[in-house]
Amino acid sequence: MDKKMIEDYIGQYIGSDNIFGYQSTDLVNKYFSDLTDGKIRGFGNAHVSHLNDYPYGWNVYKVNSMTSFRKGDVFVNTNGYGFNGIITAPYGRDKVLVVAQNFNGQNGIYYNKKDEPVDIHEYPISEIHYIIRPSSIDIKRNFKIYEDSDTLSEFIDNNKSNNNTVTLDLDKYNEIIEKANKYDELESNGQQGQI
């Protein structure tokens, strides 16, 4: 299977429930499904998306001043019906770049519009209440996170080239991924020095 890129969603209208138009959480549910080969899909409005039951290795964090954001994290704003999307890169001290749908809240049955497809936006960190961090293994198995991408090249420093290549057999790769997931789990519990 070819790995997907988050930018592949840009320009699309993604609806997963065939009601209420093309909501931000429809994109997030599609992303979750793509990450897990269709095994999981969130439920509810964006404001409760952090309450879903996620697979082993996935984490939900309440955002505070110490929170670090990673490419591929899903942000959650819990105000009203909520808003969510996929974090792609830091953007200055107080914003992140996100891929999101229905950014201005105009998609839906009340507006009967289809004018806000998935796009890239600046989003203030102060409006992010939770992040959902998929497991490293799910991201690495199914997504290319901005490798060889020029959609966001003006926002991130991706111009450094690395001509060093390492080839690993599948068992060694899986061992490394397992250790990375264990590190992520320990880090989330504040135990990163105990590996």
Image (cartoon, rainbow, N blue to C red):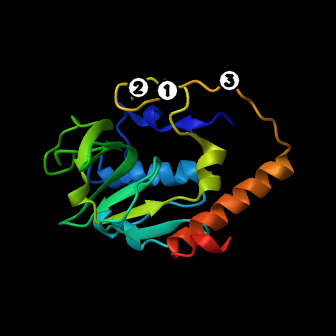
Cα separation, mark 2 vs mark 3, equals 19 Å
Q: Picture coordinates of residue 40 (x, y %)?
A: 55, 61
Quarter occupied by residue 80: bottom left
Q: Amino acid at mark 1?
A: Ser
Q: What's the mark number on residue 100?
A: none
Which of discs 2 and 1 lies nearer the camera? The answer is 2
Position of residue 96 relative to residue 68, above or below, is above
SS category of the residue bearing label 3: loop
C-alpha distance separating marks 3 and 1: 17 Å
Residue beneath the point at 49% across and 26% down: 149
User: What is the secondary structure assignment of the residue under circle 1?
Assistant: loop
The disc label shown at residue 149, or none: 1
Relative to residue 102, is residue 50 drawn left or right?
Answer: right
Quadrant including the N terminus: top right
Q: Residue at x 50, y 68 (%)?
A: 59
Image height of 36 relative to 168, above or below: below
- Which residue has dot 3 on it? 163
Callout 2, which amino acid?
Ser
Q: How many marks?
A: 3
Q: Earlier in the sequence, mark 3 or mark 1?
A: 1
Residues at discs 2 and 1 in contact (Cβ within 8 Å): yes
> Looking at the rendering, in which quadrant would you find the C terminus?
bottom right
Q: Residue at x 26, y 55 (%)?
A: 125
Mark 2 falls on what kind of element? loop
Asked whether, in this view, residue 193 is left or right of residue 87, the answer is right
Q: Position of residue 63 (x, y in %)?
A: 33, 67
Along the viewing direction, whichever of 4 and 191 lies nearer the viewer: 191
- In which image quadrant can residue 65 be found? bottom left
Residue that carries the numbered disc 2 in the rendered image: 153
